[in-house]
Amino acid sequence: MKKGDRVSGVIEKMEFPNKGMMTIEGEKVVVKNALPGQTVLAAVSKKRKGKCEGRLLEVLEPSPLETAADPCPHFGRCGGCLYQTMPYEEQLKIKEGQVRALLDGVCSQYWFEGIKASPISEGYRNKMEFSFGDEEKDGPLCLGMHKRGSFYDVVNVDECRIVHEDFRKILTATRTYFAGAGVPFYKKLRHEGYLRHLLVRRAVKTGEILAALVTTTQTENLPQGEAALLEGWKDLLLSLSLEGRFAGLLHVKNDSLADVVQDDGTEVLFGQDYFYEELLGLRFRISPFSFFQTNSLGAEVLYDTVRSYVGDTSGKVVFDLYSGTGTIAQILAPVAEKVVGVEIVEEAVLAARENAAQNGLDNCEFIAGDVLKVVGGLTDKPDLIILDPPRDGVHPKALNQIIDFGVKRMVYVSCKPTSLQRDLVTLQERGYEVERVCCVDMFPGTGNVETVCLLARKN
């Protein structure tokens, strides 16, 4: 088998996060976006170390597991979800099996507690970043998600199943408005155009909505003045009949060459630049770009699991590293002696401080900075450390500094099991053993999963 060959076979199992594995003539072929049980046609795109990678060309036969009666109408074209055609119970089994296989490869003995489901499997997301573009060159304006397997093409997702109906109304109204006005979107190759992204955040408990239009500063080719254009967009959104209510409408400028949602200056068109959400009896102020779990109801399950793994914190000093808006820190703070949070996003740290004050917690300290650069200078001596890093996990140098504190117990919250697997190798080599592991599904319909891991220092 060589690069360029076309092969067909049955997907036997899944590797995290969305790679199907099949065996062709004794060789393993990994095919992205293929589901277990599907018969697929793939083109070999890479061969390395005895394993081939294949690009999915066609699903020849569906999987026997694909029995969902009413999948999302955008499934297959939109790149956002993978498991929409499978019953939720089957999705959970696949994710549980993937995490177990990864951890069994590096851990000898531990208590694996399975996977906890999200309280809801549709309409669960509280944040979406939609992209402006077109589905085909010079086609009509689209606003939605990137087409599966494409960096440039964008497909409309007016009936997206993983968001509340309010998202869909805002999305459709925004696209229709700017398409009717003839406003150009930003073309990544030429670095020309105006419209870039639509960021929408909606709290489940309070119903408050924050919507931000992200554009470049290239206003010379607009069909009308920018101020009038934005005023019309604001008025349109405020006229929508929504279940929730707008806390704020924002205009965010972003001239970055990278395809990221970046804040180079924000103008408040209506209301304020933050909203509130509630978790486990606490209230959190959330700004446009601060980290907050995207599934609010699932986050309650996740943080309740973390709290049970942490155990009694009475009289203890807790480090919450990669603390975001301070959610975990404040959940643990009521009985702890002190909680110290470290977070690189400064606006998230400011929000965490405000949240702690609003929740009546005076034993929380939040520090703005990179964990790698800050952790070595922390003067408090922790009794317990919580790690909740981004997808890439903990920087190796930072991880060694964290281990040097010598705490008896550590809880690692991971949104990417492969990063957790890598970091557990170092943690075990340096004297920790894995005691308990539990998965929490925060992302139904997708290949992602959260994992909570309790580690204890060996005597």
Image (cartoon, helix red, strand yellow):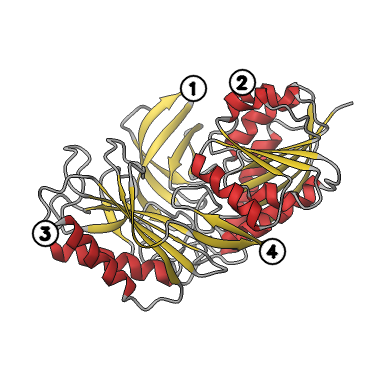
- Kindly indicate the quadrant of the structure image that contains residue 70: bottom left
Mark 4 surroundings: few (<14), some (14-19) or many (≥20) residues within 10 A: few
Query: Is the residue under label 4 in contact with that under label 3 (CB below 8 Å)?
Result: no
The Cα atoms of the two marked residues, 3 and 4, are separated by: 47 Å
- Residue 83 % position (x, y): 49, 57
Answer with mark 3 or mark 4, whichever residue precedes in sequence: 3
- Judge depth for marks 4 and 1 and give the one in front: 4
Tag 4 residue: 281
- Kindly indicate the quadrant of the structure image that contains residue 47: top left
Tag 3 residue: 224
Instruction: Name above or below for residue 175 compared with residue 417.
Output: below
**Amino acid on which the number 4 mark rests in the picture:** Gly
Task: Give me the residue at 49% from left, 45% from top.
Answer: 18
Instruction: Name above or below for residue 248 compared with residue 396.
Output: below
Element assignment for label 2: helix
Mark 1 surroundings: few (<14), some (14-19) or many (≥20) residues within 10 A: few
- Judge depth for marks 4 and 2 and give the one in front: 4
- Residue 285 % position (x, y): 55, 56
Answer with mark 4 or mark 1, whichever residue precedes in sequence: 1
Tag 2 residue: 397
